[in-house]
Image (cartoon, rainbow, N blue to C red):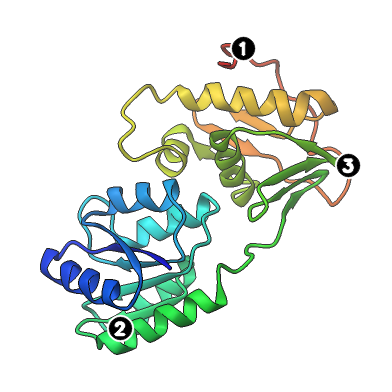
């Protein structure tokens, strides 16, 4: 059983690590939100223990980005504040359980075992937009029943756009949600990947799903249960060729 502990209080993190190790868990520890997000997206864990008050990214931001990226590992959140608002916010963002500091180690272990027995829930249900469907659990994308192969970054970008269908999202917002927090390159990488997506999910099917909102960003056009996502907009400038 593999556990990721994201906790900036090093003494508490070490106590939890030693205790869980004695209970038979394999434990990785990260001390800030950015490293925790990276670990949770790069490796497979059975459960995550996530503090709310973290440097870099707080626990709310971490779990929001995990769920937007289609990572459904069960998460137990820790907080020093026992308030209904904090609990509600955690659950609304996709947390599976919640403990207030100071907590009983026995209770922590019991709750982690319960989450592991339940496993990662298959949520959300398959995302659909017209003839386009995306299964975040099985990592499959279909259009008119034909499967479309996407790279991990293309899949994460499409997941984000489908979860915000009908909304205009800026390049900066997309970069913040889909790319690694440490990425400090050109924001126009978003434009490049939107081009990749268009060539895979739209062009072969004579559809136009992703709209460019000039000077703002992009919008995945909402569509009914059948038929195209919407009429094609103005011709887009050519994007660079996709790397091999």
Up-down: is 200 above or below 80? above
Identify the secondary structure beneath mark 3. loop
- Tell me which label, 3 or 2, sits earlier in the chain: 2
Please give the count of numbered marks on the rendered protein: 3
**What kind of element bears circle 1?**
loop
- Hey, which quadrant is residue 107 in on the image? bottom left
Residue 93 percent coordinates (x, y): 46, 65
Q: Can I make out residue 20 in this image?
A: yes
**In the drawing, does residue 102 fall left or right of residue 20?**
left
Label pair 3/1, CB-CB below 8 angstroms:
no
In 3D space, how far apart are the residues under numbered discs 2 and 1 (Cα atoms)?
50 Å
Query: Would you name the residue on which mark 3 appears?
Result: 227
**Residue in the foreground of this view, choosing between 113 and 127:** 113
Q: Name which of mark 3 and mark 1 comes first in the sequence.
A: 3
3D distance between C-alphas at marks 3 and 2: 46 Å
Quadrant assignment for the N terminus? bottom left
Distance from disc 3 to disc 1, alpha carbons, whole Å, reads 26 Å
Question: Does the rendering let one see residue 214?
Answer: no
Residue identifier under label 2: 83
Give the numbered dot on residue 237.
1
Looking at the image, which residue sits at the far left?
11
């Amino acid at each position: 059983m593999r556990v990721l502990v994201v906790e900036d209080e090093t003494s508490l993190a070490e106590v939890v690590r030693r205790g869980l190790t004695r209970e038979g868990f394999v434990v990785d520890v990260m001390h800030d939100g950015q490293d925790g997000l990276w670990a949770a997206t790069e490796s497979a864990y059975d459960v995550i223990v996530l503090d709310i008050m973290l440097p870099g990214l707080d626990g709310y931001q971490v779990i929001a980005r995990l769920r937007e990226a289609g990572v459904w590992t069960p998460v137990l959140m820790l907080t020093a504040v026992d308030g209904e608002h904090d609990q509600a916010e955690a659950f609304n963002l996709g947390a599976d359980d919640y403990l207030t500091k100071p907590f009983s180690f026995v209770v922590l272990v019991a709750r982690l075992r319960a989450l592991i027995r339940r496993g990662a829930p298959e949520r959300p249900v398959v995302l659909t937009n017209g003839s386009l469907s995306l299964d975040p659990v099985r990592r499959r994308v279909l259009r008119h029943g034909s499967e479309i192969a996407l790279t991990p970054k293309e899949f994460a970008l499409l997941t984000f756009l489908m979860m915000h269908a009908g909304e205009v999202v800026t390049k900066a917002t997309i970069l913040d949600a889909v790319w690694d927090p440490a990425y400090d390159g050109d924001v126009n990488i978003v434009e490049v990947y939107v081009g990749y997506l268009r060539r895979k999910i739209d062009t072969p099917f004579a559809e136009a799903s992703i709209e460019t909102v000039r000077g703002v960003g992009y919008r995945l056009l909402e569509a009914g249960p059948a038929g195209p996502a919407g009429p094609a907009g103005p011709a887009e400038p050519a994007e660079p060729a996709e790397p091999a």
